[in-house]
Amino acid sequence: MPVEEVLGPESCWNTCILQYVVEDKFAVTMSRSGITDLLYRLHLHYTRPTYIGQD
């Protein structure tokens, strides 16, 4: 199954998923901290999902 079918734009992307995609698409192995550094150099960022409780 292609990555596009599993990881759509509505998915919660994190460094672990980005690490998988980079390796799958470009055959490059990077650490999760390397992914974070790359995002910073490209002026991109990600946010961690947070829990929002109901009042």
Image (tube, rainbow, N blue to C red):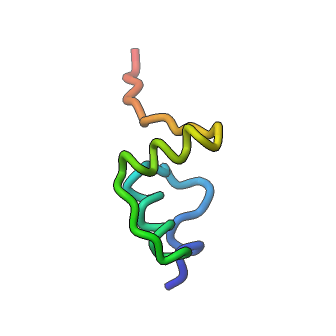
Choose between 6 and 40: the one closer to the eye. Answer: 40
At 59% across and 63% down in the image, what residue appears?
8
- Asked if 52 appears above or below 36 in the picture, the reply is above
Question: Can you say whether 50 is above or below 15 in the image?
Answer: above
Provide residue 19's location: percent of width, then percent of height: 42, 60
Residue that extends furthest to the bottom in the rendered view of this protein: 1
Quadrant of the frame with the C terminus: top left
Residue at image x 62%, y 56%? 9
Q: Is residue 17 left or right of residue 5?
A: left
Q: Is residue 41 left or right of residue 31?
A: right
Where on the picture, by quarter, is residue 40?
top right
Q: Residue furthest top?
A: 55
Query: Closest to the observer: 55 or 50?
Result: 50
Please state if 16 lies on the left or on the right of 44 as rendered: left
* Count of labels in the image: 0
Indicate the position of residue 34 as horizontal and vertical percent values: 41, 50
x then y, percent, for residue 29: 39, 68
User: Where is 7 relative to 49, above or below?
Assistant: below
* Residue at (43% x, 36% y) in the render: 49
Considering only vertical position in the picture, is 40 above or below 10? Answer: above
